[in-house]
Image: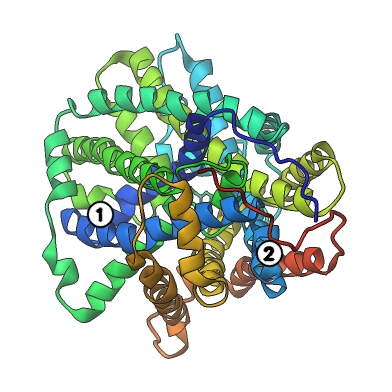
Amino acid sequence: MQHPPRDRWATRTAFILAAIGSAVGLGNIWRFPHVAFGAGGGAFLIPYFIALLTAGIPLLMLEYGLGHRMQAASPAAMARVSRKFEFSGWWAAAGGLLITFYYTIIMAWVCFYIVELLGSLGGDSLPWQKGQAESYLFSSVITGDENIRHEAGLFSPINWKAIIFNGLVWGFIYFAIRKGVHSVGKVVWVTVLLPYVLLFVLFFTSINLDGASAGMSYYLSPDWSKMDSPGEILKVASAAYGQIFFSLSIGFGIMMAYASFLPKKSDIANNAIITAFANSGTEFFAGFITFSVLGFLALNKGLFVGDVVGESSFALALISYPTAIENIQIGTDGQILFGLAFFGSLLLLGVDSAFSLTEAMVAGIHDKFSVSRKTVTVSLCVLGWLVGIIFCTPTGLVLLDSVDHYLSNYGLLLIGLIPCLAIGWIYGTKRLRTHINRVSEKRITPFWDFCIRYFTPIVLIFLLGYQAFTDLSFLWDEQAKPYSGYSLWVQLVGIGVLVAAFTLALFLTKKKPEKEGYQTIPEFEYEP
Ligand code: PHE
C-alpha cells in the first residue's frame, strides 16, 4: 500500500519546542504549586519524581515511538496496531478537543486582564483595585460587566467580551496550526521561549519581596504528616501521578501526532527525556515564584502562608496573584508591568497547549479523510468558538470546573490506559522498543517494557478506582458531597462531555477511511 509523503518538522529543535509548548501550560504555573503544597510540599517531590520516571517518561516514549513507527496521529496509529483500537485513538483526540473548548475560555479571561491592565497604564490604580481581586474576577472578568453579578440568571447575560476574546484565541490557534508542522514549528519559537523571559522577570521580582523566603521554605519543607498513613500515602501518590499525566499532556494523542512528523532518524528516547525534564523543571521553578508571592501576601495580611493558599488552584492564580501585585511597592506602572508579565506568560504558555490539542484532532482527521487541512482546521476552530459560548455565561465557571474535573481525571487516565494495553499486550513492547532503539542514540531497557505492560496500567486502574471512590463517597458518607458540591445537572454536564467525546469517536471510527493504506503499518527503512 502506498502511503503519501508526510510533512516533516523543519528541525529537531522545532519538534522539541512544540512538545515542550504542549506540555508546559497552565498546569505548570498554577496546578503544580497548588498540588505540591496540598500534598506535603518538599515531601511531595519524591512521589512526583517516582511518577515521572515510572509513568511519565515511559508513556511519553510510547507516544513518541508509536507515532513515529506508524507515521500517523493517534487514530491511525492505533488502527495500525489493531483495527479494534482505532476507536481509542479517536476518543483521545476527541477528549483533547473538548478540553480545548474550555481551556481557551481561561485564555480569554487572561486576555481580559491583559487588555484592562494595558488600559490602566499611566493611570493611578490597577483594574481590580476598586474592590478586591476576588469580586473583580467574579463580577467583571467572568460576567464581563461589573454591574450584573446580582441579577445574573443561569445562562444570561452572556459575556460578550469573553466571546470576543475567545474568538481571538481561536483565531490564533488557526494561525498557529494552519500549515501543520510548518506553521507550528515557527510559532513555538515565540510561544515557548518568550514566556521564559517573562518567568525570569517574575522570579527575580518575587524572590526579593518581603516574606518571600518564608513562602519558599513553606514550599520546600517536607510535611511528612501528609504521608503518615497508608490512606494518606495513596492520596499523595494519586496526586503525583495525576499531575504528571496532566502536565506532560499524555493520553490525548498530541505527542503521537507531533512525533508522526519526525524524520525517520530521530532520537525518540532522548527527545522524551528532554521534554519531560524541561516540563518538570519549569513547574518546579514556577513554584518558587508562586510561593514567594504567597509568602509576601501572608506577611501583608498578617497570616500564616498556609492560610493564604485557598481552596482551588484557579483562585491561586486569579485571586492571590492580583491581590499580591496590588501590594508590591513598585508604583502603579511597575505593578501593571508585573501583572502584564504574569498574565502574558499565562497566555503564551496556555496557547501552545491549546493548539497542540487541536492539532491532534486535525492530524487524525487528515490521516483518514480526503478533506483539506484548511477545511478541517477552520471547521474545528469555528466549532470550538461556538461551543465556548456556554462557558461565557454566569454558570460558565462552574460548568468549566465540572467538565475539567471529569475530563482531566477520568478521561485522561482512561484514555491513557488503552495505548499501554494495546502496546503491552497486542503489538508487543519489545517490538516497539526495538524500533525506538534502532532510531535513538540512547537505548531503552526492558524496564520500559515492565512499566508499559504492568506498572503504568496498574497505577492507572488504581487511580481511576480511587478517583471514583472519592467522587462516589457521598453515596455512603453523609459528610461527603459529589464533586465540589455542585448540583446534579452540573455533574451531568461534566460526565456528559466524556460521553460526547465517546460518541464523536464512535462516529469517526465507523466512517470508512478515504485514504489508502489507512490501516496498514508502513514500511520503515532504517538507516544503516
Ligand atoms: N499539559 C498542559 C498543562 O500543563 C495541559 C494539557 C493537558 C494540555 C492535556 C494538553 C492535554 O497545562
Occupied quadrant, residue 301 = top left
Mark 1 vs ligand 1: CB below 8 Å = no
Mark 2 vs ligand 1: CB below 8 Å = no
* Residue 386 seen anywhere in this rendered image of the structure: yes
Residue 71, compared with residue 130, is above or below; it is below
| Secondary element at tag 1 | helix
| Secondary element at tag 2 | helix
Q: Which residue does the numbered mark 1 point to in the structure image?
A: 37
- In the rendered image, the quadrant that contains the N terminus is bottom right
Occupied quadrant, residue 98 = bottom right
User: Which of the two marks, 2 or 1, is nearer to us in this view?
Assistant: 2
Residue 54, compared with residue 275, is above or below; it is below
- Residue 437 image point, x, y percent: 43, 53
515 relative to 295 in the view: left or right: right
Residue 233, compared with residue 7, is above or below; it is below
Residue drawn at x 63%, y 56% as measured from the top left: 70
Residue 10, compared with residue 81, is above or below; it is above
* Residue 149 seen anywhere in this rendered image of the structure: no
